[in-house]
Image (cartoon, rainbow, N blue to C red):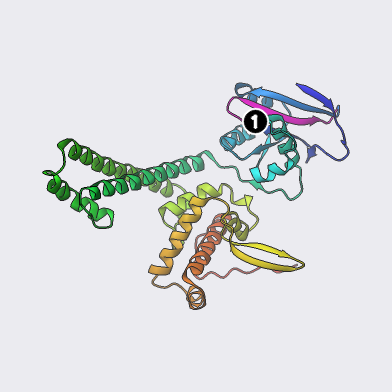
Amino acid sequence: MNRNAVQGAGQIIGLIDGRQVVGLDIAKNVFQLHSVDMRTGEIVNMQLKRAKVLEHFANRAPNLIGIEACGGAHHWARELTALGHSVRLIHAKAVRPFVSGNKTDATDARAIWLAIQQPGTKFVGMKTLAQQATLTLHRQRELLMRMKVMQINALRGLLYEFGAALAKGKNALFSEIEATLERLAGDIPQYVLESLREQVQRIKQLAADIKAIEVRLAAVLRGDKDMKRVAQIPGVGLLTATAAIATMGQASAFKSAREFCAWLGLVPKQRGTGGRVLLLGISKRGDTYLRTLLIHGARSVLCHAKEPGPWLEQLKARRPDNVVIVAQAAKMARTIWAVTARQQDYQRGHQSTRPQAA
């Protein structure tokens, strides 16, 4: 453990709400800890083996621990919270400005320790084990979908080399593939024909695996009240409802529906000076997967809704379709936060009102 005298201790408090602040840089095997001993005024900078982390914090008074939101951060946040500590997850962009000099584990831990004490710092909501499990299913499904599309495109390209052109769509592919292979049986070697049939079976197996994951997601939806509330919103289906609640983490981590919408990157970027503000395209920050689902759901509302509502009709009359779709996606995101934060069912045509000042 390296201990050095604190310089400028009057500027750096090191205590928040009476709890000592600790910056913890997590890794695969060796963790780095940074804090200030308020009794002696010394900087504590130590390394901890992975197996010793919980043992170290179990023997300490409740601290305020800052962790950069990265792989494994939510797991360690839950474990340390169970020991009585308060944990704040910080986005990497909020930590980066405080990294000075060479980027090392000690520097990162110190940067986390500094960032957590800055006024106005926004933290990442801690996900529960169930939410992480739901996101795992989504990540697996997304990977299988990519593999399926890759296999289908490769199969079409290989068949095209032998003069076979199949119609668009997966239904047309599976309905024509057997007849196409039979027609090509006299022109191509048998071992190539067998290999192509094996690829068709791989595509069908991927489709079956995707369906199995969707069945598991449906079971998760039936057992979660928040997801069932969100699923009532027009344009929100199985995938969007489960992904939205799992990605959001804690609704209380956002002050308002617009902040949640901005976190998803569905609000305009701003650029301005001298009191003049220029609004640009949407920022596209946050989770790309959830934002994509919301955009697809909004497009479905725009194209297939029987009663889109006066707001959407007026917007369609004066704005391009893509702008209307993004606006509808932003409205869906705000509604998702509202019904989750307020624990109330979706009400069509509900008009929100600002509380009257006392």
Q: Amino acid at mark 1?
A: Leu
Placement of 33 over or under 240, stated as above or below:
above
The residue under the point 76% across, 31% down is 35
Horizontal side of 269 relative to 22 (left or right) equals left
Horizontal side of 310 relative to 74 (left or right) equals left
Q: Secondary structure at mark 1?
A: loop
The residue under the point 53% across, 48% down is 247
Residue 45 in the magenta stretch? The answer is: no
Quadrant in which residue 262 is drawn? bottom right
Toward the viewer: 74 or 344? 74
Toward the viewer: 97 or 163? 163
Placement of 213 over or under 60, stated as above or below:
below
Q: Is residue 176 visible?
A: yes
Which quadrant, please, contains the C terminus?
bottom right
Placement of 81 over or under 245, stated as above or below:
above
Residue 27 in the magenta stretch? The answer is: yes
The residue identified by callout 1 is 83
User: Residue 275: x, y in percent?
Assistant: 76, 68
Q: Is residue 18 visible?
A: no
- The magenta region covers 26-39
User: Residue 21: x, y in percent?
Assistant: 75, 35
Which quadrant, please, contains the N terminus?
top right
Horizontal side of 315 relative to 126 (left or right) equals left
Residue most extreme to the left: 186
User: Residue 58: x, y in percent?
Assistant: 67, 26
The residue under the point 80% across, 38% down is 15
